[in-house]
Image: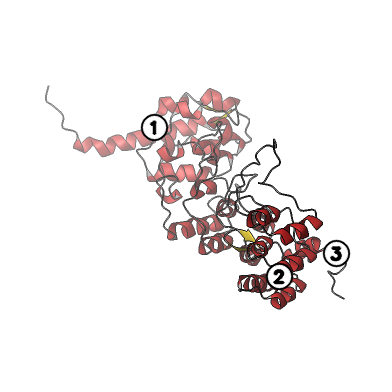
C-alpha cells in the first residue's frame, strides 16, 4: 500500500509537492494527463492511468482551461466522470473566471450539467437574477494555487523545487496577491542567484514592476543587511545585467556617486530613508566611505549629517554612532579642508550614544594637515602680482 493512500487526493498531492522525488512523479503524471486530454477524442485509458499516478485533475491543459473545462468543451462525459471521481474541484474557475458548470451551460451540455450537479457544482458567471456580478479574476484558480507553491519554494525550498513548481504550472510573471511582488523580485530580495536564473530561463520578465512600482534591481536594496553587496547579491545583480536589465538607478556600488546615495530607498514606502542613511544603519558605512574616496569632489555636508530620517527618527550622526563608525566620519578624507563645518558637528557627536568617542583634536589636526597639503600643491600654480 502506498504511504499516501490514507489521505484524500488533494492532501496527497500537497504533501507530495514538498518532496522533490515525489514532485517529479507528479510532473510526469501531469504531462501524461495533459497529453491524454489534448487528444481527439480524449484518451480515456491514458487519462485514467495518469490520475491513478496522482496527476492533478485540476491541471490547466490549454489556454487557462482546467481539465474539467476541456472535458466539458469536448462534451466527453466519460472523461468528465473520471476527473470528478478522482477529486477534481468543481469550484475551480478558468482564466476567464468561469466554473465547469458555467461552461457546461454555455455549451448546452445537459449530461455534463447533471453530472456536475451531482458533485454540488455551482456557477460563478451565470448568476441568478439580482445577484451581484462576481469580482474579476487575476488568473485561473489552479494557477493561483501553483503560484503560492512557487513562492513557498522560493522562500523555503531549493532551486530544484522552484523548477518543479514551474513545471507544475506556476506562472513566473504572476504577481503575488499578498506582497504584490513577482516571483523574480521575491528571489532577488532573498539573494538567491540559482533561483533567479531558473526564473529568468523560464521566461520571467526582467522589466516587470511590483504594484508599488519597484523594479527588480530596486528589490535588491531590500536584501537582508548581512547579504547586501555580498557574493550572492553580486551574483544576482550580474545575472540580471546579463539578461539586458540596465536601469540608471540604482547603479552598481562600484559606480555610485554621493548623489546616488542621496536618493530614497526604493521600497515604495512614503517614509523611505535615503540610501545613505539606510546603508549606514545596515552596517554598510564602508560603501559610503568608498564612494567619497572615489569621488573627491562629492561633499558630505553637516546639514545632511543632522537630517532626521522619518522612518528611523534618527540623524546620520546617530546612525554612524550606533553602528560604531562615528570616528571614521571625522577625518580629512571626508571633510577635506572644511574644518569649521566638521567642528560644527562636535556637540551632536558628543551627545550621540556611542562606545567609540571621537578625538576631535586629532580630527582637527588631520583636516588642517590636509588643508596645508592642498595649499602646497596649489602654491606653485599661483602667480603673485607685484605690489
User: Which of pointers 2 and 3 lies earlier in the amino acid sequence?
Assistant: 3
Residue 26 image label: 2
On screen, 270 above or below 107? above
Q: Residue at point 42% right, 41% down?
A: 292
Residue 322 coordinates in the image, percent (x, y): 61, 35
Q: Nearer the viewer, residue 144 or 387?
A: 144
Of the two numbered discs 1 and 3 in the rendering, the one whose residue sits closer to the viewer: 3
Of the two numbered discs 1 and 2 in the rendering, the one whose residue sits closer to the viewer: 2
Check if mark 1's residue and mark 2's residue have beta carbons within 8 Å: no
Query: Counting other residues with Cα less than 10 Å from the Cα at mark 3, is it few (<14), some (14-19), or many (20 or more)?
Result: few
User: Which of pointers 1 and 3 lies earlier in the amino acid sequence?
Assistant: 3
Query: Counting other residues with Cα less than 10 Å from the Cα at mark 1, is it few (<14), some (14-19), or many (20 or more)?
Result: some
User: Which of pointers 1 and 2 lies earlier in the amino acid sequence?
Assistant: 2
What residue would you read off at disc 3?
7
Residue 63 image label: none
Residue 71 coordinates in the image, percent (x, y): 67, 65
Q: How is the image coloured?
A: secondary structure
Residue 262 coordinates in the image, percent (x, y): 45, 36
Left or right side of 107 for 362: left
Q: Nearer the viewer, residue 275 or 294?
A: 275
Numbered disc 2: secondary structure: helix
Numbered disc 1: secondary structure: helix
**Quarter-wise, where is residue 198 in the image?**
bottom right
How far is disc 2 from disc 3 in space, using C-alphas? 16 Å
What residue would you read off at disc 1?
368
On screen, 194 above or below 124? below
On screen, 134 above or below 167? above
Amino acid at each position: 500500500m502506498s504511504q499516501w493512500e490514507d489521505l484524500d487526493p488533494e492532501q496527497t498531492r500537497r504533501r507530495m509537492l514538498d518532496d522533490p522525488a515525489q514532485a517529479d512523479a507528479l510532473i510526469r503524471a501531469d504531462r501524461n494527463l495533459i497529453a491524454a486530454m489534448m487528444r481527439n477524442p480524449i484518451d480515456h485509458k491514458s487519462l485514467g492511468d495518469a490520475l491513478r499516478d496522482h496527476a492533478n485533475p485540476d491541471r490547466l491543459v490549454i489556454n487557462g482551461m482546467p481539465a474539467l473545462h476541456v472535458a466539458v468543451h469536448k462534451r466527453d462525459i466519460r472523461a468528465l466522470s473520471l476527473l470528478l471521481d478522482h477529486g477534481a474541484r468543481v469550484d475551480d474557475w478558468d482564466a476567464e473566471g468561469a466554473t465547469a458548470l458555467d461552461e457546461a451551460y454555455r455549451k448546452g451540455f445537459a449530461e455534463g450539467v447533471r453530472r456536475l450537479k451531482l458533485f454540488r457544482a455551482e456557477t460563478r458567471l451565470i448568476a441568478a437574477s439580482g445577484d451581484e456580478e462576481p469580482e474579476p479574476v487575476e488568473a485561473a484558480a489552479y494557477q493561483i494555487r501553483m503560484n503560492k507553491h512557487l513562492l513557498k519554494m522560493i522562500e523555503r525550498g531549493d532551486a530544484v523545487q522552484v523548477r518543479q513548481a514551474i513545471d507544475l504550472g506556476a506562472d513566473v510573471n504572476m504577481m503575488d496577491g499578498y506582497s504584490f511582488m513577482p516571483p523574480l523580485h521575491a528571489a532577488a530580495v532573498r539573494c538567491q542567484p540559482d533561483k533567479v536564473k531558473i526564473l529568468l530561463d523560464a521566461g520571467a520578465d526582467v522589466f516587470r514592476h511590483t504594484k508599488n512600482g519597484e523594479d527588480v534591481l530596486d528589490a535588491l536594496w531590500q536584501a537582508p543587511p548581512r547579504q547586501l553587496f555580498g557574493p550572492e547579491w553580486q551574483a544576482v545583480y550580474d545575472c540580471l545585467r546579463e539578461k539586458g536589465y540596465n536601469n540608471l538607478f540604482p547603479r552598481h556600488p562600484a559606480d555610485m556617486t554621493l548623489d546616488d546615495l542621496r536618493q530614497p530607498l526604493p521600497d515604495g514606502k512614503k517614509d523611505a530613508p535615503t540610501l545613505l542613511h539606510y546603508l549606514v544603519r545596515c552596517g554598510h558605512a564602508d560603501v559610503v566611505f568608498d564612494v567619497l574616496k572615489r569621488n573627491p569632489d562629492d561633499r558630505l555636508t553637516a546639514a545632511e549629517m543632522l537630517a532626521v530620517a522619518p522612518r528611523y527618527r534618527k540623524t546620520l550622526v546617530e546612525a554612524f554612532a550606533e553602528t560604531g563608525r562615528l570616528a571614521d566620519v571625522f577625518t580629512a578624507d571626508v571633510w577635506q579642508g572644511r574644518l569649521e563645518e566638521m567642528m560644527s558637528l562636535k556637540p551632536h557627536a558628543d551627545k550621540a550614544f556611542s562606545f567609540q568617542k571621537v578625538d576631535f583634536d586629532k580630527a582637527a589636526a588631520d583636516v588642517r594637515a590636509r588643508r596645508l597639503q592642498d595649499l602646497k600643491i596649489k602654491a606653485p600654480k599661483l602667480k603673485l602680482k607685484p605690489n
